[in-house]
């Protein structure tokens, strides 16, 4: 019996030490060597919060704004960021509130609508009146919300494997994040686990495990170790409300391109087909033998279809 108590005590101390030794925030300067395109990184204050973004291309060119998915960062755009700029666009890849190297305020608004508001504030600071929004997964929900709530600011819309309802909350990890008390203790350990992250990335990338070089895993993992990021992830899950995307899709008036991976295990292709039917005049392109993130699995093809769509005169 005493041995059990010793083991339980050791585990408890280990967990407490891990939680106490977490960095509070992701340190851009310390991690600069691992950040892709760090020479393009910029910071600007939006509504009192420091927002990290990366910019490339001619400032007078049409603006393309890249919005990453849940618990992610500008990293996911690293393979298409410069090619899109070279295709004739002013490219802005942003770290959403609470993620990557953007600020992680304790009382921040981590809802989809809150993220959309911060994004509009960023465009104001950059003097961008209208832009084509390119949103991946959860970022697609943010982009669609911008199109619905700020229609004059959105030129066109590219939605990639877009979250469009609350079904992701049924995933095992999301249920843990949602659980009060238990989730507050266990979630940081799961979010900060490099092993768990690698396993999840393998699943997201379908059969393209070659995407997962060690630098890429480290670049994704380091911001997730910060207590501020972990808190933002938990609050994002607990404030998750994406039902509006499916419900109001028929109200989206901007030209819309839907991009989906054939084997997307996160947001199934059937969701893309339903959105295609709902959004007037939308176009759906399916990437064969592709998972949840076509811009990393097929960067050249992705760059081509997005550039063609964004330059097309309708």
Image (cartoon, helix red, strand yellow):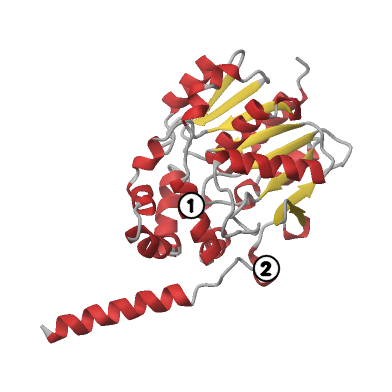
Q: Is residue 80 visible?
A: no
Q: Which mark, by number, is residue 276?
A: none
Quadrant where the image shows the C terminus: top right
Q: Is residue 54 visible?
A: yes
Residue 215: percent from left, percent from top: 57, 62
Q: Nearer the viewer, residue 133 or 242?
A: 242
Quadrant where the image shows the N terminus: bottom left
Q: Residues within 10 Å of mark 2 (few under 14, many from 20)?
A: few
Q: Which mark, by number, is residue 235?
A: 1
User: What residue do we see at 51% from left, 15% from top?
Assistant: 277
Residue 146: percent from left, percent from top: 65, 32
Secondary structure under tag 1 reads helix
> Label 2 belongs to which residue?
33
User: What residue do we see at 35% from left, 78% from top?
Assistant: 14
Reply above or below: 25 against 157.
below
**Horizontal placement of 88 versus 235: left or right?**
right
Circle nearer the viewer, 1 or 2: 1
Residues tagged 1 and 2 counted as in contact (Cβ below 8 A) = no
Q: Residue furthest right?
A: 60
Reply above or below: 125 against 270.
below
User: What residue do we see at 48% from left, 77% from top?
Assistant: 21
Q: Residue furthest front?
A: 107
**Horizontal placement of 18 versus 228: left or right?**
left
**Horizontal placement of 68 versus 242: left or right?**
right
Secondary structure under tag 2 reads helix
């Amino acid at each position: 019996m005493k041995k059990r108590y010793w083991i339980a005590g050791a585990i408890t101390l280990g967990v407490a030490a891990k939680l106490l030794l977490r960095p509070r925030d992701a340190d851009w300067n310390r991690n600069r060597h691992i950040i892709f395109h760090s020479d393009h990184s910029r910071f600007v204050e939006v509504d009192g919060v420091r927002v990290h973004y990366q910019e490339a291309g001619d400032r007078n060119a049409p603006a393309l704004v890249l919005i990453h998915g849940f618990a992610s960062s500008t990293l996911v755009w690293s393979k298409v960021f410069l090619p899109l700029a070279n295709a004739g666009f002013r490219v802005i890849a942003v770290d959403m509130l609470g993620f990557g190297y953007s600020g992680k305020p304790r009382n921040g608004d981590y809802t989809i609508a809150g993220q959309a508001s911060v994004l509009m504030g960023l465009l104001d600071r950059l003097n961008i009146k209208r832009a084509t929004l390119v949103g991946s997964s959860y970022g697609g929900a943010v982009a669609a919300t911008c199109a619905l709530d700020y229609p004059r600011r959105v030129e066109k819309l590219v939605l990639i494997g877009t979250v469009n309802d609350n079904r992701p909350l049924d995933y095992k990890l999301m249920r843990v994040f949602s659980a009060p008390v238990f989730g507050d203790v266990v979630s940081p350990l799961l979010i900060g686990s490099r092993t768990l992250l690698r396993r999840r990335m393998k699943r997201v990338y379908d059969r393209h495990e070659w995407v997962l070089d060690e630098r890429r895993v480290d670049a994704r993992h380091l911001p997730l170790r910060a207590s501020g990021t972990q808190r933002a992830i938990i609050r994002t899950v607990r404030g998750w409300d994406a039902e509006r995307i499916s419900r109001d899709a028929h109200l989206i008036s901007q030209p819309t391109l839907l991009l989906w991976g054939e084997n997307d295990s996160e947001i199934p292709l059937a969701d893309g087909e339903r959105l295609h039917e709902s959004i007037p005049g939308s176009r759906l392109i399916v990437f064969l033998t592709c998972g949840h993130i076509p811009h990393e699995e097929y960067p050249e093809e992705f760059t081509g279809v997005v550039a063609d769509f964004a330059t097309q005169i309708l």
